[in-house]
Image (cartoon, helix red, strand yellow):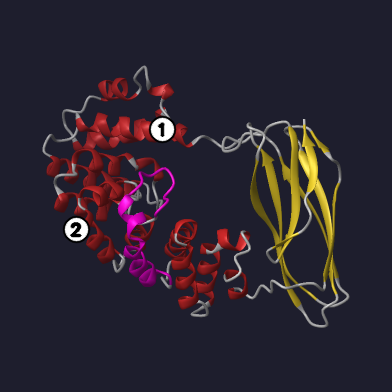
Amino acid sequence: MAELLKHKYSQAFMDLLAGHLEAEISAFNRQAFFGQVFSKEWENYELKERMTHIARTLNGILSPDYREAVKQINRIISRHRREHPNGFNFEFMFFPEFVQLYGLEDFETSVAAMEEITQFTSCEFVVRHFLLHHPEKMTRQMSDWASHPHSYVRRLASEGMRTRLPWAIKVPLLFDDPQLILPILDRLVNDESEWVRRSVANSLNDLTKDRPELAVSFARKWKGHSPQVDQALKHGMRTLLKNGHPEVLPLFGIQTAIPQVRAEFALETQQVALGNELEFSLKVDSEDPGDLFLRLEYRLYFLRKNGSHNSKTFKISEKNIRAGEALHIRKKHSFKFITTRAYYPGEHYISLVINGNEREKTAFVIH
């Protein structure tokens, strides 16, 4: 099992941070610092709670003058980069949290701080608070950052403006006026950095859930610009593709009328023990005289606690198929315990989806 992110704040990491603080602050007391961080509530804190707790602890250690404290943080970051030049530093996201907690009223200092800190560890959560408190100034700043020479700052312009950024606070401004986001996406969809383009894709995917017409219009505008842009657009349209959106499927060469395609879909068993895997197979062939591009997916209807079902679509493959050719595919879906979904015993359903067209559902039981 993968390590929980909150466990990155280990004793070893705190030793490293304490070393940086000792080098910066002559009166730093290492043992007192450990006592404050590893308080009796520490073990109960989740990831973001730990970030906030460390930021609040730093507030009693760094300079009481916010501007001077920001300078100290920047010097610590510079020192860490010299000693550990390893790119993105997720663990240090309590530095942006410090800016959010203590710098909302000092816009200029905080914007300059975020511009530097995000090149070390992301400020995507923090800018949301500034968008709430300083909407006009922060929106202009995000637009300016979209042209910044550093890719991490450009990514911040896109990621921070997402309507549904995971773990982040909601910014009603972005829901009420999503047109604010589009100029930034226009500027960054063809960015040289794949990481930036992927952020654009995630922002587009957020838009598809609330304002699909804007997302589709954006995709039409940029489709065919370059292979890199097309890849970003397709990733950004992933939810609409899975939903079989009639305008989006053809945009990516997926023919929706496919009466000449035959499919055989079969479950290995109708009974699955919780924690095990559902196995299924499919055979697909085509009578079309030419090549036919197929997008193959399966849709699971999960039983809810109240007896209703909710569905989720999973991609199998995208393939070209010739007349007389048959595709044979075997697949498994795991029902092992995960934190993001609860499984309930009873009847579930699965169906095959070909180019957005759902075939007949098949029932199976989880016990």
* Residue lying at the far right of the rendered structure: 324
Does the magenta portion include 172? yes
Q: Label 2 amino acid?
A: Lys
Q: Amino acid at mark 1?
A: Tyr
Q: Nearer the viewer, residue 307 or 65?
A: 307
Q: If the image is split into quadrants, where does the C terminus sit?
A: top right
x%, y% of residue 331?
A: 78, 52
Residue designated by label 1: 9
Q: Secondary structure at mark 2?
A: helix
Q: Is 180 situated left or right of 206 in this image?
A: left
The CA distance from mark 1 to mark 2 is 34 Å
Pointer 1 local density, CA inside 10 Å: few below 14, some 14–19, many at least 20 = some
Q: Quadrant of residue 90?
A: top left
**Residue hosting label 2:** 137
Q: Decide: marks 1, 2 in contact (CB < 8 A)? A: no
Image coords of residue 254 (percent x, y) = 66, 72
Coordinates of residue 301 in the picture (x, y in percent): 69, 45
- Span shown in magenta: 163-189
